[in-house]
Amino acid sequence: MAGVNGELCGLICVNKPAGFTSFDVVAKMRGILKMKRLGHGGTLDPMATGVLPVFAGKATKACDMLPDRDKSYLAGFRLGARSDTQDNTGIISETENFSGIAEEQLRKEMKNFRGKIMQLPPMYSAVSVNGKRLYELARKGIEVEREPRETEIYSLELTEYDESSGTGKFSVSCSKGTYIRTLINDIGDALGCGGIMTSLVRTAACGYKLSDCVTIEQLQEISDNGGDFSPFVRPLEKVFGDIPELHLKGAQERMYRCGIKLDLDKLKFDKSARRIKVFGESEFLGTAVPDTENGILRIEKNFY
């Protein structure tokens, strides 16, 4: 969809290619779309492919406030190896005998990693410790103490496994902040042979799937032919699809646009909601938070 002065405004689901960082994708799209106001949600490692939400125009203000929806992946792995990056892009520092790790044993161990688990953030990650990104320290050969973090694995299913090579794939659905390469590393450690990630495809994020995505090549072709990008731009309000709505008209809309906190008793919406989507008569205005203690509606973020 187009915003003010014809600038695109909304969400573009991109199938990130391998070898690109998430920032590389945004930089490439700035050239293709000929606009600067772009940002991404949910960073993917360079080796990974799949669903990368890219926000355009005023929608970039939503990059840091997406609902904590589940993410799904298809991950490749190899048992019998360890890596400083926990994947096959790093230095393979140790190789161990994985013979005897039968499929049944692997499936049994994987059951222990379903539900709420603790993960130690890998050194090659964007987590900050004392103002420094861990990957910056790791590149200098510095390792620091990290605090384990709780994450949740909703589903974890083995889809392929070759006992002779110790390689396979699994599908996983998990909460935000889960490191799939760390999950593979920890499963390998539990089996006593180590494990590294060999491939990663994010199959779902922000409520969108791979089938909803467009490729960089497709966008480039549209640009080269002077085509219209709007069919690939999804309205921002769809990202907040599971949040109750409030529709304002007339004086209430004018007051809201002026930053006036509205009286909750005079509004019609799901009073149990902690966050709501606010619409005017003609457009999505933004999100707001009901302050039940003071009986007012507090503006969280405007997108008009």
Image (cartoon, grey):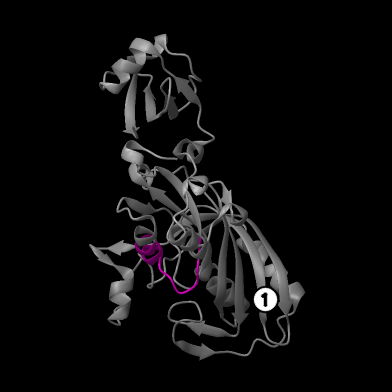
Q: How many discs appear?
A: 1
- Write down the region rendered in magenta: 15-28
Q: Is residue 210 visible?
A: yes
Q: How far across and down, in percent of the image, does residue 170 sit?
A: 66, 67
User: What amino acid is at disc 1?
Assistant: Gly
Left-right relation of 101 to 180: right
Q: How far across and down, in percent of the image, does residue 51 sit?
A: 53, 58
> Vertically, is 26 above or below 194?
above
Placement of the N terminus among the 4 image quadrants: top left
Q: How far across and down, in percent of the image, does residue 79 sit?
A: 61, 81
Placement of the C terminus among the 4 image quadrants: top left
| Residue shown at the point (23%, 62%) measured from the top left | 131
> Vertically, is 160 above or below 234?
below
Q: Nearer the viewer, residue 21 or 28?
A: 28
Left-right relation of 140 to 230: left
Q: Name the residue under label 1.
A: 168
Is 191 in the magenta? no
Q: Is residue 294 visible?
A: no
Left-right relation of 72 to 293: right
> Vertically, is 9 above or below 248?
below
Q: How far across and down, in percent of the image, does residue 211 sit?
A: 62, 55
> Vertically, is 94 above or below 187?
below
Label 1, secondary structure: give it: strand
The residue carrying pointer 1 sits among few (fewer than 14), some (14 to 19) or many (20 or more) residues within 10 Å by Cα, namely: some
| Residue shown at the point (50%, 72%) measured from the top left | 18
